[in-house]
Image (cartoon, rainbow, N blue to C red):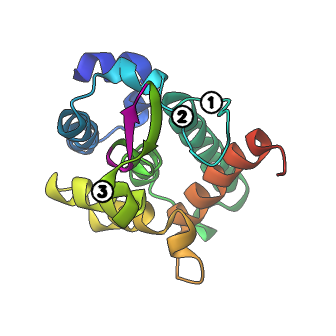
Amino acid sequence: MKNKLLKLIPEFDLIKDSDLKEKTLNVWVKALKIRKMQPDDMLRMPFTLLIKPCPANFVEHTRGVVQVSHGAARALQNVYGEKIPINMDYLLSGALLHDVGKILEYVEKDRQFVKSSEGKYLRHPFSGVGLAFDEGIPDEVLHMIAVHAGEGDGKWRSNEAVIIHHADFTNFEPLHGGN
């Protein structure tokens, strides 16, 4: 399963810390096993239920958020250097894991994805933190998962969390068409 994830989402290889990369992959494997899904199933899974029909799948969205986060962080480092400290491996892990809880929040019924019973009570930032905590993901990355969406509005966000939050919406709003 890990090899297939690495093929679908090659951005895992951007994480230089091999232990953090392994833990990040393990979170994905755990979520897929809980939902009894294969990695290819995520190619059918919409990245959001708020846009119908959804123009992008879960894998595309995840990759887009990672790439925008990575590019933004590199640009900030190039211009500001240490004035804006960024832990790149933590940022990449957080971007890869920001929506992993959606694997539990959504379920496929009658060939379409809908909110699961778990998803009605816990949105993906909460379930994502739970999945990642169990795998030993650092607190700094758990924070990014927890505050990347509306649940983090009005709360303090680390530099990495700010980047992921904006990268997520940069990947959402153009596909939503401003509606």
Q: Are marks 3 and 2 in contact (CB under 8 Å)?
A: no
Viewer-closest of 41 and 144: 41
Q: Badge 3 is on which residue?
A: 118
Q: Badge 1 is on which residue?
A: 56
Q: Badge 2 is on which residue?
A: 46
Of tags 3 and 2, the one toward the viewer is 3
Distance of label 1 from label 2 (alpha carbons): 6 Å
Left or right of 114, for residue 178: right
Distance of label 3 from label 2 (alpha carbons): 17 Å
Q: Do the residues labelled 1 and 2 touch (CB within 8 Å)?
A: yes
Q: Residue at x 84, y 50 (%)?
A: 178
Binning the other alpha carbons within 10 Å of mark 3 as few (below 14), some (14 to 19) or many (20 upward) gives some
Label 1: element kind? loop
Q: Quadrant of residue 107?
A: top left
Viewer-closest of 134 and 175: 175
Q: What residue type is labelled 3?
A: Glu
